[in-house]
Amino acid sequence: MSNILDSLIVIGLIIAAAITAWSVLTPNHLFIG
């Protein structure tokens, strides 16, 4: 019934995991500030 919301949640989790992996694997990532 809420397939759009489910897909948005899944995409959000994937993006969060990608950002976390990026920040862990790259010492010079943008979030150091």
Image (cartoon, grey):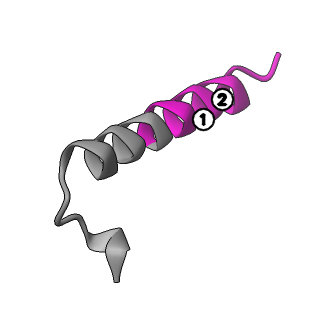
As shown in the figure, which amino acid type bears the numbered disc 1? Leu
Name the kind of residue labelled 2 in the image: Ile
Disc 1 element: helix
Looking at the image, which is closer to me, 25 or 8?
A: 25
* Quadrant showing the N terminus: top right
Quadrant of the rendered image containing residue 30: bottom left
Pointers 2 and 1 in contact (C-beta within 8 Å) = yes
Along the line of sight, the residue nearer the viewer: 4 or 24? 24
Q: Is residue 10 within the magenta segment?
A: yes
Left or right: 4 as drawn, with respect to 28 = right
Range shown magenta: 1-15
What label does residue 4 carry, if any? 2
Helix, strand or loop at label 2? It is helix
**Residue in the picture at 21% in, 42% down:** 25
Image coordinates of residue 29 in percent, x first then y, are: 23, 64
Residue 12 place in picture, x, y as percent? 55, 39
Q: Quadrant of the C terminus?
A: bottom left
Q: Which residue is mark 1?
A: 8
Q: In the image as oriented, which residue stretches furthest toward the front?
A: 27
**Residue 9 place in picture, x, y as percent:** 64, 32
Q: How would you rate the neighbour count of disc 2 (Cα within 10 Å): few for under 14, some for 14-19, many for 20 or more? A: few
Above or below: residue 10 compared with residue 16: above
Q: Is residue 31 above or below residue 7?
A: below
